[in-house]
Image (cartoon, helix red, strand yellow):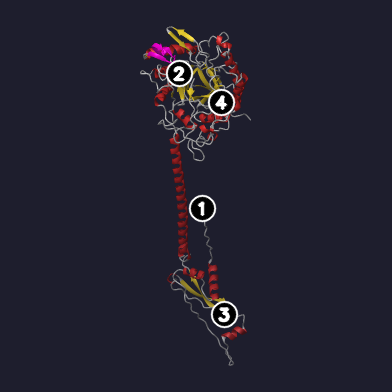
Amino acid sequence: MHQHGAPQDDEVTIFRSGRTDEDRDDSLTQSERSGSITQPDAFRRASLPRESQRGSVLMARPSNVFNPMPSSPSRFSGRQSTYVHHHQFSMHDDGSTSTEDMDTLNPSKEKMKLVNIATLERPEAQRDYRGQLRRWPGMLLLGVVVATAVVAISLGARQSYNASLQRRQDVLVREQRRRAIQDGLVDDSVLVDADGKVGNPMTYDSTGRKCQLPDYQSKNGRVYAVAANGTEVTVAIKGTNWFGMETGHAIPFGLWENDQNGTTVYEVAAFLHRHKFNSIRLPLCAQSILKNTAPDKRLINLDTNRAINIKGYMELLKSVLKALAYRDITVLLSMHTLTTKGATGSWFNADVSEDDFLKAIDMLTSELCSDEYWNVIGIDLKNEPNDCGWGPSDKASAKCDWVAGAKLIGDRMHAGCKNWLAFVEGSASMGHTVGKITYFDWWGGRLQDADTVPVTLKTQDKLVWSPHYYSTAVAPQPYFYDNVVRAADGQGYASYTELPDDTLKTNIHITMEHMFGYLREKRKYAIVVGEFGGLYTKDEHPQYTIRRTVDFTIQEMMLDGYSGGYMWCINPESAYDFPSAGRKAFTSEGLLLDDWLTPNKLFMEAMAKMNALPNLRPFPCFAPEKKKP
């Protein structure tokens, strides 16, 4: 029950040719033929040892060209001077002959020259070379300098680039922290997308995390997640409701993140995960499912909710489910309303027929019953069917029998998805007297006859009892007070006395036990309270009767046989009529304050008591089974 307002390096190789001694002689001859010493010859000579360190031998060597012969070098610091020793002959008419004439008469005779041949005392070694080789270290040094410069520039550029990335990342982290719900806790897993965005992925499919849709079961008074290999994990539920999709806006509220208020689906999931919430009850509208109604785009910031698809109702639902699955938060789909006009107490009316309703169930199972949406645990078959009776003998069943309706809808759901659980609420309210206490059932709370007139589904171990239980904030109840005098207009109490803790706690236990708590003793199906809470911090009672009622309700849920519950709700827009039993006034409150960024401290502290629930843990992510070839 609720009310709410609208809202690599290059390598250089240096080659050096080698020569034999004969090569060097030939090279020297070539120099003499040219009449000069070429630069390589000079370098070669310069490499010879000093004259004092070796002997000199003069040998004749034929030459076709009469050129000067070099003398023995004195010092090898430069180009050497040469001296020519030769004999000239002259023959005239008197019988003498000159050298030139002899050359003419005997052309085959070669002119002679002396060649200086060095006799080495030891083989030449690389260290003896001091000419050209002296230049190589300089070239190598230059190469090293250039390479070092290139490396330094590259490293500098890389460091600059990395620093730029870090600055950008810091900005994005600050932006994410600003967008986060300010609970003072550190997130244990911050998702950074490929483009560097923090806490705002383009898609949750890119995380690479895959889970198997378990077979969710309800047996022995507990909820189980059962893997395909038979592994069973018992799980208690610490949940909250998040409304908005059941309204004409067709979208969960609070996703309009801007400079003043609003948040994102990523941050809602992260916030709940940090505080050990493991499930969300998500109210839906049957007509919006059937029409695939497009969400109100004014109520979402798509820049900061990039993974959310608002093309249609089902697309939105799927993207929200994936965002919550990333934090191991399961979802209970609640068939809350038939149309956007408001709440109805049956699963059909003039606008949505029974066949239409069942078709909506089919759409949910066909679209969502898969490993991709492993975190859907089931459907709350109909929210608060308070127009219907319980069983054929109930007079209210003349309009609609909720036992028959729950069986019809539950079996239809299991025909499409045998893995899901069917959450069943109570029917129309009635007055009851237990000892000295007289009370009326809360809407959705009446399950007194569920044991004797059971809902029998075709699929075993699939039913979960899901009653509602509230406080004075929704409607003042006499068993919360003493000395009650009703107001003349029927709106609250003109006067009353607040009860001491022990009496209030006892009265809450008696009424909860009589409505539905007794079913825990049967040890058959789990009991998960579908709605409880309401106001808390804004309780105006001097002795805080509303706060104490919520606290004692949580204590009851700690008893063996209960498997937790879903508090109403995270939305700050949720409105209530009575901040105290004596004053009717529109009052809104949720787990978050109006900015959707600040936690409601007192309410969060109250919900933290649910952390003591036996078997409270994140729902398991079973690895999908490998398909056989």
Q: Residue at x 56, y 9 (%)?
A: 395
Discs 3/4, front? 4
Q: What element carries label 4?
A: loop
Give the label, 4 or 2, closer to the camera. Answer: 2
Disc 2 or disc 3, which is closer to the eye? 2
Q: What residue type is labelled 3?
A: Lys
Q: Quickly name the residue at label 3.
A: 111
Of tags 2 and 1, the one toward the viewer is: 2
Task: Name the spot of residue 373 as percent of width and height, x first.
Answer: 56, 28
Residue 369 visible in the current orientation? no
Q: Quote the CA–CA distance across marks 2 and 1.
A: 76 Å
Q: Regarding mark 1 in the picture, which secondary structure is present there? A: loop
Read off the magenta span. 477-496
Is 200 colored magenta in this rendering?
no
Task: Report the number of discs.
Answer: 4
Separation of residues labelled 3 and 4 (CA atoms): 108 Å
Q: In which quarter of the image is residue 208?
A: top right
Label 1 CA crowd tier, 10 Å (few <14, some 14–19, many 20+): few
Q: Name the residue under label 2.
A: 474
Vertical side of 426 occupied by 241: above or below = below
Q: Looking at the picture, how far across and down is residue 588, in whole percent?
A: 44, 24
Which one is earlier in the sequence, the residue at label 1 or at label 3? 1
Residue 491 drawn in magenta: yes
Q: Which amino acid does label 2 sit on?
A: Val
The residue labelled by disc 1 is 9
Disc 4 from disc 2: Cα separation: 37 Å
Q: Which mark is residue 444?
A: none
Determine whether, in the image, residue 435 is placed left or right of residue 112: left
